């Protein structure tokens, strides 16, 4: 198909729905001469979820435009990012990612024979690559490395050297994969600009960078593997999809931070060029949309009910998920899934009369709390803040709300560093006094950071802070 298109048509297809392109002129020049070589990489950490259909849809666009596409399974990156993937699970995670992403691509009709799949450790442990890591490390400051990875690498108060290496390795991948362009989310922009700055210093060509917008999750914030309620897993059953969509943030008339609408825009329209709202005949019956902007206008005008939108997305999404779920019903892939993502170990002793109770259910740990960013109105000024407050016991008593990082949205989960992956209790029973026991160690540090036992309270965007109450208690 790419051979039948003009360079202008290819450019339009390659860049549609992107938030930003760095190097547009260079992209146009290459398309006049030959096909574009582009790569997309994914660190093999948590299970891929439905938001992965967004880059998959763009990969479909790249192939339709005749691009040569490489998919990188970045296993070494997964380990360097605060060991999100333990070393002993790296190979299993890569196998899982390869199987599930190939199943996704097949589900949306992308021919796998036109793709090249590469594993990071196939070349990142070579002598040449290692020497380039050292060369790059002699040029990049700690400040620049930390800044580059701020929105991608897990941020902690005392970062490991591994996390500081991560952005540089991603920059070097562009040279070692021999591509013209790298594609990723806009959250990787700082890594892309670091690559543009430093690759020429090593004698390598500056690459083109193409960025997708960040698609909101079901709770309104970023869809995240570590936040169960924000995402739909690719292997979730139909009833689980229905349940999660039913709870999704989808306020009537509100098109901001609406993950359901964003899925229509960035996945369903690029794949099918249309979207059907399914509804009862008494409300006008089904309506076919061939333009996303019309869907958004009708939703903003409340001519599309959130319930109808969710039900229609549920139907379309299940059609995409069905072949993936079917593929993973085989004994081999069930075993792979269980091995790559083992269940948390059980408390063998358990509580008396309940041997199945897990250690987390008995142990009073921060991951048992479900704390969220909420929208508040103070003296008529709407802002994002925490339901938690800091206080100092003095006369008069001082109280102020905690502040989430800039860019936070209602529904973003708050967790304690090191306890981000646990499942919150469905209900905090008063007799158990879980919050009361944890509250004893909730304090504001001398640096005005909210902490539990000197471990920071975080969202995916960074630390929770307090403006003035140093040393205060959190309540």
Image: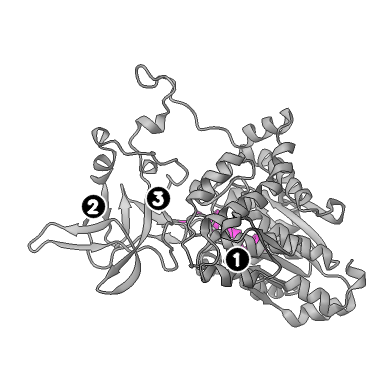
Q: Is residue 305 left or right of residue 60?
A: left
Taking the magenta stretch, the answer to whether it contains residue 159 is: yes
Of callouts 1 and 3, which one flags the residue occurring earlier in the amino acid sequence? 1
Q: Which of the numbered marks, if any, corresponds to residue 415? A: 3
Place of residue 234 in the rendered image (x, y in percent of width and height, measured from the top left):
64, 45
Q: Position of residue 438 (x, y in %)?
A: 28, 43
Q: Which residues are magenta?
A: 158-170
Q: CA distance from mark 1 to mark 3?
A: 23 Å
Residue displayed at 35% across by 21% down: 351
Q: Quadrant of residue 144?
A: bottom right
Closest to the observer: 149 or 319? 319
| Cα–Cα span, label 3 and label 2 | 15 Å
**Residue depicted at x 68% and y 31%:** 334
Q: Give coordinates of residue 350: x percent, y percent.
A: 39, 21
Which image quarter is the N terminus in? bottom right
Residue 475 shows which numbered tag? 2
Characterize the local packing of mark 2: few (<14), some (14-19) or many (20 or more) Cα atoms within 10 angstroms.
Answer: some
Nearest to the eye among marks 2 and 1: give it: 2
Task: Name the chief secondary structure element in magenta.
Answer: helix
Residue hosting label 1 = 188
Residue occupying the point 27% across, 68% down: 467
């Amino acid at each position: 198909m790419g051979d039948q298109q003009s360079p202008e048509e290819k450019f339009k297809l390659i860049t549609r729905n992107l938030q930003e392109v760095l190097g547009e002129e260079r992209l146009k020049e290459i398309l006049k001469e030959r096909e574009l070589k582009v790569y997309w990489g994914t660190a093999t950490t948590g299970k891929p979820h439905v938001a992965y259909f967004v880059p998959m849809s763009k990969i479909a666009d790249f192939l339709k435009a005749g691009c040569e596409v490489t998919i990188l399974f970045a296993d070494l990156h997964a380990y360097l990012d605060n060991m999100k993937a333990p070393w002993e699970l790296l190979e299993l995670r890569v196998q899982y990612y390869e199987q599930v992403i190939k199943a996704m691509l097949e589900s949306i009709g992308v021919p796998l024979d036109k793709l090249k799949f590469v594993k990071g450790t196939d070349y990142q442990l070579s002598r040449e690559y290692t020497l380039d890591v050292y060369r790059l490390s002699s040029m990049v400051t700690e400040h620049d490395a930390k800044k580059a990875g701020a929105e991608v690498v897990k941020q902690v108060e005392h970062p490991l050297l591994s996390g500081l290496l991560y952005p540089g390795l991603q920059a070097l991948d562009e040279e070692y994969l021999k591509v013209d362009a790298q594609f990723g989310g806009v959250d990787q922009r700082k890594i892309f600009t670091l690559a543009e700055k430093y690759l020429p210093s090593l004698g390598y060509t500056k690459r083109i960078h193409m960025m997708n917008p960040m698609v909101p999750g079901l709770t309104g914030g970023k869809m995240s593997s570590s936040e169960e309620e924000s995402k739909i897993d690719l292997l979730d059953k139909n009833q689980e999809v229905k349940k999660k969509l039913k709870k999704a943030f989808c306020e009537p008339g509100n098109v901001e931070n609406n993950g359901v609408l964003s899925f229509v825009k960035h996945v369903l329209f690029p794949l099918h060029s249309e979207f059907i709202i399914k509804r009862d005949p008494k409300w006008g019956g089904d309506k076919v949309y061939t333009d996303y902007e019309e869907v958004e206008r009708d939703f903003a005008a409340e001519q599309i009910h959130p319930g109808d939108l969710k039900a229609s997305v549920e139907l379309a999404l299940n059609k995409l998920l069905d072949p993936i779920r079917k593929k993973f019903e085989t004994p081999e892939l069930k075993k792979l899934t269980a091995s790559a993502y083992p269940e948390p170990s059980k408390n063998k002793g358990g509580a008396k009369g309940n041997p199945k109770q897990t250690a987390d259910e008995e142990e009073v740990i921060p991951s048992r709390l479900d704390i969220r960013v909420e929208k508040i109105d103070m003296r008529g000024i709407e802002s994002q803040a925490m339901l938690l407050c800091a206080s100092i016991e003095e006369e008069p008593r001082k109280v102020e709300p905690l502040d989430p990082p800039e860019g936070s949205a209602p529904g973003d989960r708050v967790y304690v560093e090191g306890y981000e992956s646990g499942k919150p209790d469905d209900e905090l029973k008063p007799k158990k006094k879980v919050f009361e026991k944890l509250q004893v160690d909730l304090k504001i540090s001398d640096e005005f950071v909210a902490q539990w036992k000197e471990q920071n309270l975080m969202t995916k965007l960074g630390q929770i802070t307090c403006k003035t109450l140093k040393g205060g208690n959190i309540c």
